[in-house]
Image (cartoon, coloured by chain):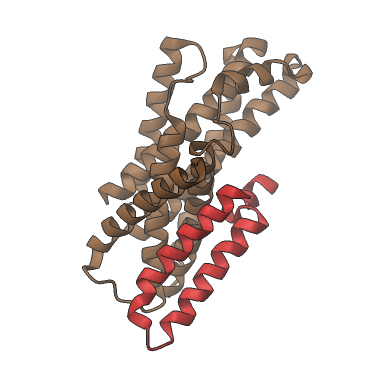
Chain colours: A red, B brown
């Protein structure tokens, strides 16, 4: 069961980094800079992957 | 669809290679027949999970909710694989070594006990296969090609079985980190695309944006790996 949950959600750090990236993209999507949200999320996710690689 | 099938096939290849190492280590202790029944039992559980997962996801009537759920799980998966591949590529983490994995499994005291060894093979194949299951269900349901995705995973399984049958040793020469890096970038691109679409974002260039996202992840991932190396 633990393996199943880990496969779906990863560890806590993985989950929160992804959630924060998506939340930030949602915020951008509701500002006048909405067209840039499609750039913001990939950049944030790449930064997230870089953070996960280092920690 | 080709991108989704390629990602499924490559993910499955990496996971089945790891599962094969476990089955091989167990087979040398309790024999091939018992080790293969454990592996087949795990694959049967995965097949049931695939059917159940697809069934429940297809019952979600709201397309945006379905896209967000699948996209979120793909982002979690892609980010994990890309992060690991960057860490290994940059030398922050040691590369996955099938020979070392095989040796550590063979050194386990319980591997010589029939029931415990059977459980090691069953749990090993099941755990490695869960990531294949996630990709088959997520990409299959979202692209409406679940059977094709499952067939891609099965094709990878057959290739690994054939390679294992002829080599009779761990498949250590599979470029696992390169595959994980590429698949991580691809899965992250799919996840990003669908999450943003579910939130109402209209991608410029429509589906072609997927390729741009993939290229962006590859370039960015390589740049971060190079940066961490220095």
Q: Residue at x 49, y 20 (%)?
A: B172
In this view, B9 is above or below B220: above
Q: Residue at x 54, y 63 (%)?
A: A18
Q: How many marks?
A: 0
Q: Residue at x 32, y 45 (%)?
A: B5
Left of A42 or right of it: where is A18? Answer: right
Q: Is residue B209 visible?
A: yes
Residue B8, how many percent across, how many down? Answer: 38, 43
Residue closest to the eye, B27 or A44: A44
In this view, B16 is above or below A4: above
Residue closest to the eye, B72 or B150: B72
Residue B216, how many percent across, how many down? Answer: 33, 56
Residue A42, how many percent across, how many down? Answer: 41, 63
Q: Is residue B141 visible?
A: no
As drawn, the residue found furthest toward the front would be B230
Residue A11, how many percent across, how many down? Answer: 65, 53
Left of B36 or right of it: where is B167? Answer: left
Q: Which quadrant would residue B155 be assigned to in this image?
A: top left
In this view, B163 is above or below B54: above
In this view, B111 is above or below A3: above
Q: Residue at x 47, y 56 (%)?
A: B74
As drawn, the residue found furthest toward the bottom would be A32
Residue closest to the eye, B24 or B7: B7
């Amino acid at each position: 069961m633990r393996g199943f949950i880990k496969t779906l959600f990863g560890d806590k750090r993985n989950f929160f980094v992804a959630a924060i990236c998506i939340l930030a993209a949602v915020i951008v999507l509701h500002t006048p800079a909405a067209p840039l949200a499609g750039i913001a999320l990939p950049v944030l996710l790449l930064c997230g992957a870089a953070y996960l690689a280092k920690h | 669809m080709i991108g989704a099938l390629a990602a499924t096939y490559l993910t499955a290849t990496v996971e089945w290679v790891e599962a094969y190492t476990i089955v091989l280590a167990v087979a040398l202790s309790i024999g091939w027949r018992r080790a293969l029944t454990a592996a087949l039992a795990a694959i049967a559980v995965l097949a049931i999970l695939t059917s159940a997962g697809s069934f429940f996801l297809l019952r979600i009537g709201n397309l945006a909710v379905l896209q967000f759920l699948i996209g979120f799980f793909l982002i979690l998966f892609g980010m994990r694989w890309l992060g690991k591949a960057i860490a290994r590529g940059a030398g922050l983490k040691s590369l996955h070594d099938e020979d070392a994995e095989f040796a550590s499994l063979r050194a386990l005291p319980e591997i010589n006990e029939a029931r415990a060894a059977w459980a090691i093979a069953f749990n090993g194949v099941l755990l490695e296969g869960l990531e294949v299951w996630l990709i088959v269900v997520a990409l299959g349901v979202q692209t409406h090609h679940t059977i094709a995705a499952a067939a891609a995973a099965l094709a990878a399984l057959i290739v690994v079985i054939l390679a294992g049958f002829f080599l009779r040793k761990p498949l250590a020469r599979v470029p696992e980190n390169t595959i994980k890096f590429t698949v991580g970038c691809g899965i992250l691109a799919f996840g990003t695309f669908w999450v943003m679409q579910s939130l109402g974002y209209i991608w410029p260039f429509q589906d072609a944006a997927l390729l741009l996202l993939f290229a962006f992840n590859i370039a960015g991932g390589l740049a971060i790996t190079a940066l961490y190396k220095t």
